Image (cartoon, rainbow, N blue to C red):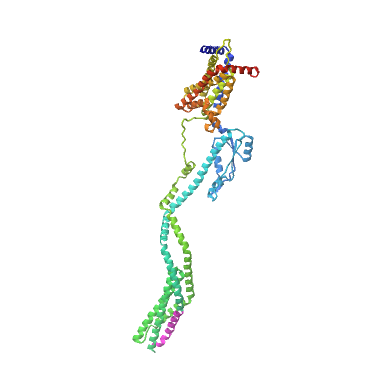
Amino acid sequence: MIRGAREIFKRDIRAIVRSPVVMFVLAVIILIPSLYAVFNIQATLDPYAHTSDIKVAVVNEDMGSKFNGTQYNLGNEFVDELKNNTNFDWQFLDKQTAMDGLKTGKYYAVIIIPGNFTEDILSIKTSDPHQAHMEYIVNDKLNPVAPRITNAGVDAVQAKINDEVVKTVDGIIFGKLSDVGELAKANKAQFLKTKSMVNELNGNLGEIDSSLDQANSDMTTVNSVWSKVSTNLPQIKSNADYAKSKSDQLAGYIGNDPSKALTTVQDMEVKVSNLVTALNYMKAILTSLYNLTGDPQLKTIITQIDGDITEANQALTVLKAAEADLKSTGTTTRLSQLKTSIDQMDSAVNALYNNQGKINSAISEASAKLGLANSQWPTFRSAIQEAAAKLNSVSESDLDSLISLSEVNQTGVKSYFESPVDLEKEHIYPVKNYGSALAPFYIPISLWIGGIIAVAMLTMRVKSRKKYHSTSVYMGRMGVFLIIAILQALVVGVATLFLDVQISSKILFILTTLYISLCSMVIIYSMTSAVGNAGKALAIIILVFQITGTAGIFPLELLPSFFQAIHPYLPLTYAVGALREVVGGVLWSSFWYNIILLTVFPVAAFILTLVIKEKMDKRAQWMEDKLEESGLF
């Protein structure tokens, strides 16, 4: 068996060496996998590096808006940002041109900033803040990937806009807070003084209540007493007039009737003394009322009464001196002085009498003011308590904190709110580009395709007069296929090294690629050798399943349940896993795990073929003959 296999292998090698045509065909078979792998890896190496060629139209219709006297136009600011952004080929156009270009495929997407964009953003200053809106319109028909790329780009633009909005609005807010801090700094002493005064006033509310109650009681008393006192004004006037009339008669009595003169002077003293008493009583009542209300009219009247009392007391003093003279000598020289004092007193009392209406008006007005105080006091009392509570809620340390806002760095605040959290990204086993990440998928797939092409182009039969055992044919012809697998792997591996693909170890990469190619070829060759064309079809079916089921592009969790179920039973699942270790950085336990499980498939295929080869060979031959007879195969 081994001898027959060796003869077949040597015969195949001689056939290849002697025929340039065969060598050319084999060269093509060897090169095809590399074309598939290299072209796909190169095409996907870093596609996002060229997004700057994707045209996206931007329409800015923002009219801007004023905030506290300052004109803002965030739409213009974002356009300026985009002009410095090279992620896409931004085209700044009017709406009609942009939409026409989108429909014809000139632009992949259109971003429209509406006229009320800034106004909506600054609605934060109103009682009805609402979101600002932008329109993003994409032509999905143009390309399956471009809309996803532009979506990601627009998301980035939206994030940038949100950052700018937050930075702008928070800059405004902290600008105002800084102004408040400056204001607090300038008025701290006055605030603390006011707080102390209000607290003192709040602490005396009980005393004020008592004072107001006492004032009400006193006002009642004053009003009651005044009604009686005011009736004495005519009597006061009468007493003054009486004293004046008697002073005129007194000159006739002195020298002629000393006794009559003395009696007259004594009567005048009584009248003037009663007048002084009545005026003092009136003054006391009005003074109490003035103390209650502070009415300036009452102060004027009290001053007038003081003058009346003074005049009356002077007249009373002169009368007493005249009485003493009359008692001792029977005459007096004070008539002129007495007449002057009595006349002045009478004049003052008559003036007071004539102002009775003003006095009554002043008392009524004072009473009304006290009534107003009574009605307003509950409101004032509540306001004082509320003011004290609010002022006490702000401590001096709170005020100092507010003052510290005036020292905040506005630029730093804006930068902080633009990005309050700095995300530190760390990659373990980093892969530098998209093509490097896809290389572990494309390389095994290309080698599997190379194996399918090899079994499709080369026959499994050994055309010889000598009859060989089926096992000898299987093992002997395998040598050529293994050589093809090795050469395919070397071409793919070396070509990949010339690309900008990340490789952690070049030697390990080449060895792993060789091993994957050999395993794939053994599996495909064994299936074809065992069951003929059915084996080729089975290899193609497995290829179709492996394109998705190996999770070489999308995570396994995102795949349909069918592919998740078959994933562990696909040989290239472990080929992809092993190459990922070589590309991203080797975790040896994971690498050997994948290599060992990959080995299971060709070993199982080899053993199974040895078992069934002889039995299946005639059936496979019969099927091939029938297909050949049809003239179609």
Q: Is residue 200 magenta?
A: no
Q: Quadrant of the C terminus?
A: top right
Q: Is residue 553 visible?
A: no
Q: Position of residue 102 (x, y in %)?
A: 62, 36
Q: Nearer the viewer, residue 392 or 235?
A: 392
Q: Nearer the viewer, residue 233 or 530?
A: 530
Q: Is residue 456 visible?
A: yes
Residue that extends furthest to the right in the rendered view of this protein:
631
Compared with 598, 257 (above or below) is below
Taken as a whole, is the magenta stretch helix, strand or loop? helix
Q: Nearer the viewer, residue 121 or 203?
A: 203
Q: Nearer the viewer, residue 41 or 499?
A: 41
Left/right of residue 114 with respect to residue 202 in the rendered view: right
Residue 30 falls in which quadrant of the image? Answer: top right
Residue that extends furthest to the left in the rendered view of this protein:
328
Residue that extends furthest to the bottom in the rendered view of this protein:
256
* Figure label count: 0
Q: Position of residue 83 (x, y in %)?
A: 55, 38
Q: Position of residue 419 (x, y in %)?
A: 48, 41
Residue at coordinates 42% horizontally, 64% vertically from top-left?
208
Compared with 298, 31 (above or below) is above
Q: Position of residue 329 (x, y in %)?
A: 34, 86
Residue that extends furthest to the top in the rendered view of this protein:
465
Q: Which residues are magenta?
A: 234-255
